Amino acid sequence: METTIFTTNAVKTQSPLFSDSRRRRGRFLRPALALLALLFLPPAVPHLLSLRDPGPPARPADAIFVLTGGEGRIQEGYRAWSGGAARELYILGAGRRIPVARIVPEVSRISAEALSRIHVEGWSENTLENAFSAKSAVGGGKYSSVILVTSDYHVPRAVLAFRKVLPPDVTLSVIRVRPEGGAGASWRWARRHFIEGWKYWGYRILLRWE
C-alpha cells in the first residue's frame, strides 16, 4: 500500500499533464491578481492617507463648512457649531431660496444673534464649487481656521479640493460623518468608498491644470 501511494504521487509530480496544468493555472492567476490590485488598490490609497487629516481643534475655529448631499452632514455640522466648535456655520449647496428653518429645524429655539451666524449658500452644486464658495466666505471673514463637515467616504476628495482652493495659511480640519447602519450598509460603505476613491484621482488630474 505504501509503495502504491508513493508511486502514484511520483507519477503526478513527474507527469507533463500535471505540470502543464499547474503552469496554466499560474499563468492565469498572476494576471488576475494583478488586475484585482490595479482595480482596488488605487481607490483604497486616498482613504488610507486621509486618516491623517486632523479632527476639530481644541480651540474654536472661525467657521464650519457643511457640504450637503450626504446623510447626517447638516445635523452633525449644526451639532458641532452649537457645541462651540466654531463661530460661524456655513451650509453649502443647500439649494436656492431654501430657508434655514427648513434645513435646521432647531434654529427656532436659538437667539437672533446666533441665527445671524448661520449662512445657507445655494449656488454650488459639486465639491469643487463648494470649495470656491468657501473661499469667498474665508476671504470675506478673514478666517484662519475652518472645519469641513462631510461624509467619511467623501473626505479625501473634499479635502483635496479645499486645500487646492483655500489660501495655504488657512488651517483645515475635518469632521467625518458616518453613515447609518441597516440592511445593506456594508455594501453601500464599500461601494461609496470604491467610487469616491476613483473620483479622487479624477480630481487630482483635474486640479493639476487649475
Image (cartoon, helix red, strand yellow):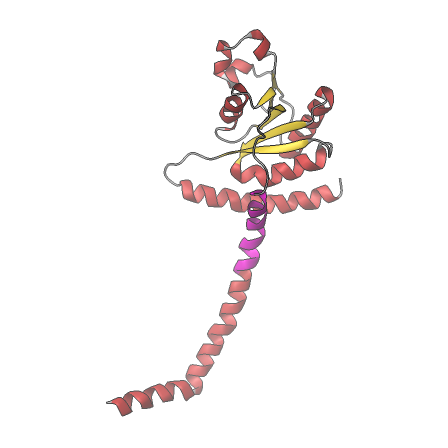
Outermost top residue: 112
Q: Position of residue 149 (x, y in %)?
A: 56, 30
Residue 95 visible in the snapshot: no
Q: Position of residue 178 (x, y in %)?
A: 47, 35
Q: Is residue 95 positioned above or below 190 on the image?
A: above
Does the segment drawn in magenta span residue 40?
yes
Outermost left residue: 1
Q: Is residue 52 positioned above or below 112 on the image?
A: below
Identity of the residue drawn at 73% across and 20% down = 140
Identity of the residue drawn at 52% across and 68% down = 30
Q: Position of residue 60 (x, y in %)?
A: 60, 24
Does the segment drawn in magenta span residue 177?
no
Image quadrant occupied by the C terminus? top right
Magenta stretch secondary structure, dominant = helix
Give left or right: position of 166 versus 127.
right
Image quadrant occupied by the N terminus? bottom left
Identity of the residue drawn at 55% across and 47% down = 48
Outermost front residue: 58
Identity of the residue drawn at 73% across and 24% down = 139
Highlighted magenta segment, given as a residue range: 36-51
Q: Position of residue 47 (x, y in %)?
A: 56, 45
Q: How many marks?
A: 0
- Which quadrant of the structure image shows residue 118? top right
Q: Is residue 112 positioned above or below 29 on the image?
A: above
Decide which of 123, 57 is in the foreground and name it.
57
Give left or right: position of 49 versus 163.
left
Residue 153 visible in the snapshot: yes
